[in-house]
Amino acid sequence: MAKKNLLDPNANGFIEHDHNNDGIDRRGFLKCMAWAGTGALCVIEGGVLKSHALASQMGSEMKSHKMGELSFVQISDSHMGFNKPANPDVIATLQAAVDKINALPEKPEFILHTGDISHLSKPSEFDNVDQILKATNKEIFFVPGEHDVLNDEGVMFRERYGKNSKGQGWYSFDKNGVHFIGLVNVMNLKAGGLGTLGNEQLEWMEDDVKHLKSSTPIVVFAHIPLWSVYPQWGWGTDDSGQALSYLKKFGSVTVLNGHIHQTMQKVEGNITFHTAFSTAFPQPAPGQGEGPGPMKVPAEQLRSILGITDVNYVQGRHALAVVDSTLA
Amino acid sequence: MTKRKLLFGSFALTLPLALATVLIMHPTRAKSEAAASPTEVRVDNFTFGPATLTVPVNSTVTWINKDDLPHVIASDDGVFKSKALDTDDKYSYTFSKAGTYAYYCSIHPKMVGKIIVQ
């Protein structure tokens, strides 16, 4: 495989000119977008994000990393039931995501789905997703997107995917020494606001992490970004700052979100934020175009902006490697 | 509303009965619906158009979703709330009391609007 460095090798992060203090600057953002469609690898060491093009992952650099202590996959926004021009066949693209997962060289132990499983919260839509994902043969952990809790305050979602969850569907679990926290930020949204966690969930979370050693790697996953990606379009969570304040003592925190149907990264202190591709349809870059609706691209390009995220944790390195790859 | 129901064959039989009921129960509402456009709010590209709509008491306001994604119309204080409206779905609410009704999309809460009833 030809080695190709798609990014400035001197770039250590993305946010270079954050005038609005909202986590986005134009240069940094374009750099993030340069990753989308090519696949990229991030390694976080000592709070510094180091980026590599996916093509170089196969090179000698990565061979020095002993991969495989914990590997899992994140998928997001499958929007089963969507049938508009932006993707008339979301079944086919979810199946392509499953094929991609099954072909990964490093076999994932489980899958996280960060919400918008369905498009309209219909049982048949959830059934279709369950049927397709069965072919991965993996345990799957879900958090709801707003499309999964449309008409019943999430009752059906919790019956299907949240049997052991607390409150409106939040929970935590441990795998190979990593503590995972699944949060719900798509319910009880207030007029004019963003995503919301709410006091009950925040109190649970504070208590949930209290007993953990600060060396425990933390992975938080939720549908709407837990950082301010673009509040004008609702791409953020009002009380995420409170939630993240409980994680200050930890050396390694990785936050995985969906909702915005494109990959984006940000590092802030000990926390690395990452958003995943959708498996269904792309959405425009923040502020590009008139609004955050489905984006129609030429059919032959669609699969190059849909994809999956592969995450590897190597014990003792305080580093989770996050790799996006497209369905193309 | 009438037009949409006609699209569904199974509703064809019940339609005359439903219409008759509406006419008997709410003669003024039937009239104001006939006037159409001033009481319609288009939900398009994640905005309500018009964002502020002023109507007389007893008007029925109809929201129609023109987006490729669903929206839910909900008043801030819980007076009214639609089910999820998929593309081209409509939701109507009749305002029988004067006042200002702030509403939003409960799944995209940045979308806000206002109905002023005089």
Image (spheres, grey):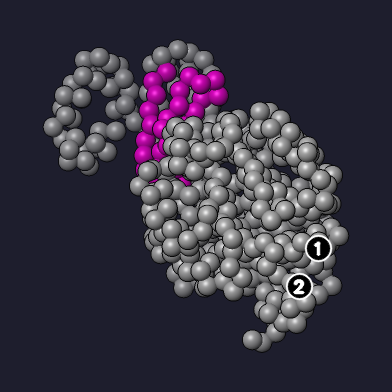
Looking at the image, residue A60 sits to the left or right of residue B94; the answer is: right
Residue pointed to by mark 2: A65
SS category of the residue bearing label 1: loop
Q: Which residue does the image show at 63% across and 51% down from the upper left?
A: A257
Q: CA distance from mark 2 to mark 1?
A: 9 Å
User: In the figure, residue A55 lies in which quadrant?
Assistant: bottom right
Specify the label residue A317 is tagged with: 1
Front position in the image: A114 or B32: A114
N-term-proximal mark, 2 vs 1: 2
Q: Which residue does the image show at 68% across and 28% down from the upper left?
A: A199
Image mark 2: chain: A
Same-chain check, marks 2 and 1: yes
Looking at the image, residue A252 sits to the left or right of residue A184; the answer is: right
Identify which amino acid the numbered label 2 is placed on.
His
Whether tag 2 and tag 1 are in contact, CB under 8 A, the answer is: yes
Looking at the image, residue A213 sits to the left or right of residue B47; the answer is: right
The part of the chain drawn in magenta is B67-95
Crowdedness near tag 2: few (<14), some (14–19) or many (≥20) residues, C-alpha within 10 Å: few
